[in-house]
Amino acid sequence: MRRELLQHKLAYSILLIGVLLFTALFMGAWPNKLIQRIIIMALVFFYFLWGVLTHFKTKTITSQVIYEYGGVAFLGGLLLMLITL
Amino acid sequence: MNIGSTLHHLFHPQRSNNHRPRVLQPRAFIFFSAIALGFFGILHQLILPLQPMGLVLGFSSSITPVKVIEQTNQERAKLGLLPLKINDKLTRAALAKGQDMFSDQYWAHVAPDGKEPWSFIGEAGYTYKVAGENLARDFFYTGDMVKAWMSSPTHRANIANDRYREVGIAVIDGVMAGHETTLVVQMFGSPQQVAVAVDSTNPKSTDNLVKKQPALESDQLSFSEPVVLASAMSTNDDFVLPPLFSALQLTKAFFLGLIMMIVLTLFYDGFVIGHRDTARMVGKNLAHIIFLIGVSFLLIFFKGGIVG
């Protein structure tokens, strides 16, 4: 994993900044649950897009990879959405 | 297929699962999503409405009226405002409002039958120049609740309104829409005679405030005999031990368990594949781990509570 991290420093930096930013926004939006849900949807979209673009750039994209990112993003988003209900 | 080979198939990258643990494949994430939805649905639609109140699952907050008043006055002190005094009639109005919300099962300033907060204040015998109401539910801690009020411009405007002189608080436990909760009703008021005094000393500033905060003029209500009520009330007359954990805590624990299983499998998969010479076209384990740890952080630190 360290090698992977070093090979794609920029991509992982963007991912880390994005996740941290959405986390801060989510915490800052409390107690407004509507805004929190919008932030969750933005985080899900960001992660899916990050995954697709990163694999597209490295020419390692397949339908399986797209489904995988879609699945992980959907699961994470769903869990967060459910606790805000 | 025995248990050992099933576990291998689920968690170990090997030929049978195309060198990607089954639990990390796209279909598995859909399956986990369905499990999470099923768990949430069963908990909220079947277990919570059917189980007796406050046994194992339930809601228990540490909010007390004294703490609410203390922290409200602390916020006012920060703004250089006078502390609010407890008024028994406002407390009675707050209790009546809270009981009305539980009995008619609504969560709003205006009841389904059109009854407004000012009616409760009037019925309690409080004659006011200006009055206001803050509501909150599902909070565990007083500090979080007051912070939530201060984060909302309209609720903050009530707490920071220098025309209010008195306050009544009700903290009421009960069941709302099938879920145990604690409602907090905060009624603000300024007795008519005090407000008049403010008018005479600084009419200009008062007019400005009235424009910002439209005050409801009371009808000429007659005062009833003062009634002293406890500022907290529970719907249960008997003492009940607090429940072991709340629905939110149980949901968080289940979801975190699900995420931890996936994250550990991602680490394990990365470790095993790192020591092999296997080429495969799959998503990045490290990216999934970063994303899911972010989700876990939000799950852990998510605070419940609604202000109204």
Image: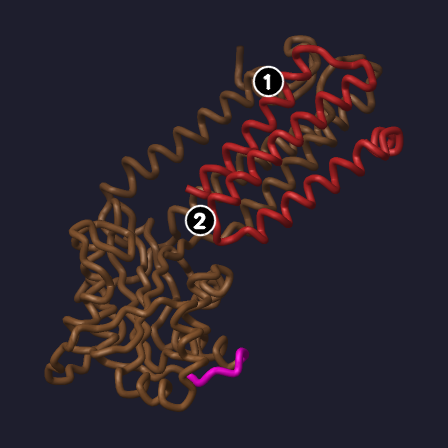
Chain colours: A red, B brown
Residue extending farthest to the front is: B204
- Between B99 and B234, the residue placed more toward the observer is B99
- Between A65 and B278, the residue placed more toward the observer is A65
Disc 1 on helix, strand or loop? helix
Residues shaded magenta: B78-83
- For the point 54% across and 79% down, the residue is B78
Say whether mark 2 and mark 1 are on the same chain.
Answer: yes
Amino acid under disc 1: Pro
User: Is residue B77 shown left or right of residue B42?
Assistant: right
Cα distance, mark 1 to mark 2?
Answer: 28 Å
Judge whether residue B238 can be spotted in this image: no
Compared to A17, does B107 lie above or below? below
Quadrant in the picture for residue B206: bottom left
Q: Mark 1 or mark 2: which comes first in sequence?
A: 1
Amino acid under disc 2: Gln
Where in the figure is residue B110, as x and y percent of width and height?
25, 55
Q: Is disc 1 surrounded by few (<14), some (14 to 19) or many (20+) residues within 10 Å?
A: some
Magenta region includes residue B183: no
Where in the figure is residue B66, as x and y percent of width and height?
36, 77
Compared to B56, does B241 lie above or below? below
| Residue located beneath label 1 in the image | B26
Quadrant in the picture for residue A61: top right
| Residue located beneath label 2 in the image | B249
**Residue at mark 1: chain:** B
